[in-house]
Image (tube, grey):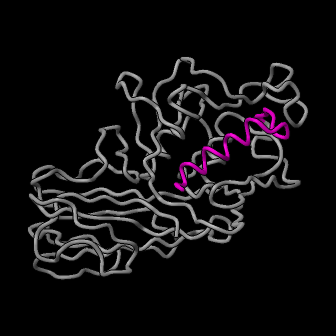
Amino acid sequence: MLKKQIAVELMKHLVTHDWHGYSQISRWGDGEGKCNVPTGAGTYQVEQGDRDCSSAIIDAYETAGITCGGATYTGNMRRLMCATGNFRWHPMSSGYIAQAGDVYLNEVNHTAMCLSAEPDLLMEFSISENGGIDGAEGDQTGDESNIHAYYDYPWDGILECINTEEAGAGGDSVVEIMKADIPVPEYRVYTAEDGWLEWMHGLSCSDGCGDDFAGIPGHLIRNVQIENLGPGGWYRLNMKHQGELERNQQNPDLSDYVIGLTAYYDTPDPDATGYYRAKYRVASSGMDYLKWEYDDEDGGAGDDVNGVDRLQLTLEKE
């Protein structure tokens, strides 16, 4: 069973169980107990108490084991969730049809999760029993959270969940609610033709260029800068002529070019969030991407012969 399917089941519980009403004040639950939610991959636990439109979706995905990158509300869901590599953005004009688990998003006001494409149904937290942002705990009206037919809010676009990981099968595996605030790595590359290119935030570029990688095909990368690798995190460049540089050292000789790279992520607060690791890969000029690498487990990315022209870097929970 896919983790995405687990998220759908968890969200369905949240919008149908009368313990969960609408509140922007106590939007992460009451902290007083857990609800056991049976799924096809075991029993998961979510906090009792209320949610709002965005916290419910984030809770469902995080509990299912798919990180949302520290997203906290509609205004940062697109940027941070796409940066994890678990989600892809489709503007409504693209014609993309949402599937179960995908997220309709108005970046200012509202969000809802798709329950099914046929029939087209949404799951959402709407409003408290008194028509405001807070009320008595739980769903007092049966409609503070709900499932109903698709409508146009209007939506800005759809966050497609592209994570294809399988959930752990068998047993009564209980996964605690996570409210992770994980700093996603930021990085940029330098080429002789273009100088420093725009910063990447995970698999999204900071200026909205639409690329999921740093670099320009055919332009050899001659320097790399990486930030937000955690307190003890590091990266190391392997250069064609100079060999391996020191950890976190940028290239002092821009006539040389990168043929490999190793990155290591040090989780800031693993007791609160669990452990994360760097997930990255490169493409040699004129070639397809090499395999994904994880921290320094397998010697890093690159064939150590050919110059690199593209880099992708994000995080994955261990």
Query: Residue at the spot x=84%, y=36% of the render?
Result: 18
| Residue 307 location (% of width, % of height) | 12, 67
| Residue 60 location (% of width, % of height) | 64, 47
Q: Is residue 50 left or right of residue 186?
A: right
Residue furthest to the right in view is: 136
Nearer to me, 287 or 255: 287
Nearer to me, 4 or 29: 4
Give above or below for 223 relative to 241. above
Residues shaded magenta: 1-24
- Which of the 4 image quadrants contains residue 249? bottom left
Nearer to me, 67 or 271: 67
| Residue 150 location (% of width, % of height) | 57, 21
The tally of labels here is: 0
Q: Is residue 157 magenta?
A: no
Q: Is residue 17 left or right of residue 65?
A: right
Q: Is residue 14 magenta?
A: yes
Image quarter in which the N terminus is found: bottom right
Give above or below for 66 relative to 130. below
- Which of the 4 image quadrants contains residue 133? top right
Give above or below for 46 relative to 157. below
Nearer to me, 81 or 255: 81
- Which of the 4 image quadrants contains residue 219? bottom left
| Residue 152 location (% of width, % of height) | 54, 17
Query: Residue at the spot x=13%, y=68% of the render?
Result: 257
Give above or below for 214 relative to 267. above
